[in-house]
Image: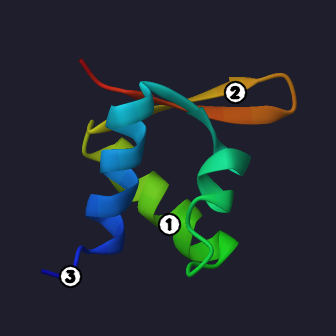
């Protein structure tokens, strides 16, 4: 079964609990930065993940 990019991103965040955005980008080399950010934005707006700023970087957290 082929996993959608959104499902893959959500699974990575849920597995890690917390992950820097840059690391998430590294784990999805088949996606562009814009594609990843659009998916993160959508997942965040649907309250499936939380996006937090940490200094100049961003971190994604799984919603418990």
Q: Neighbour class for label 3 at 10 Å: few (<14), some, many (≥20)?
A: few
Residue at image position (56%, 67%) is 28
For disc 3, the marked residue is 2
Which of the 4 quarters of the picture holds residue 42? Answer: bottom left
Report the Cα–Cα distance between label 3 and label 1.
20 Å
Report the Cα–Cα distance between label 2 and label 1.
17 Å
Q: Neighbour class for label 2 at 10 Å: few (<14), some, many (≥20)?
A: few
Residue at image position (69%, 35%) is 58
For disc 1, the marked residue is 38
Considering depth in this image, is 32 or 1 the residue closer to the camera?
Answer: 1
Quadrant in which the C terminus appears: top left
- Ranked by sequence position, the earlier of labels 2 and 1 is 1
On screen, 33 above or below 40? below
On screen, 42 above or below 48? below
For disc 2, the marked residue is 53
Number of numbered callouts drawn: 3
What is the x, y in percent for residue 12? 40, 46
What SS does tag 1 mark? helix
What is the x, y in percent for residue 1? 12, 80
Q: Neighbour class for label 1 at 10 Å: few (<14), some, many (≥20)?
A: few
Which of the 4 quarters of the picture holds residue 34? Answer: bottom right
Q: Is residue 2 left or right of residue 1?
A: right
Q: Is residue 17 left or right of residue 60?
A: left
Question: Viewer-nearest of labels 3 and 1?
Answer: 3
- Ranked by sequence position, the earlier of labels 3 and 2 is 3
Q: Is residue 60 left or right of residue 58?
A: left
On screen, 37 above or below 31? above
What is the x, y in percent for residue 27? 58, 59
**Label 3–label 2 contact, CB within 8 A:** no
């Amino acid at each position: 079964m082929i996993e959608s990019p959104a499902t893959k991103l959500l699974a990575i965040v849920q597995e890690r609990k917390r992950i820097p955005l840059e690391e998430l980008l590294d784990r999805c080399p088949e996606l562009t930065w814009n594609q990843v950010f659009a998916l993160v934005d959508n997942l965040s707006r649907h309250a499936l993940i939380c996006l937090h700023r940490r200094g100049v970087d961003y971190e994604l957290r799984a919603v418990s």
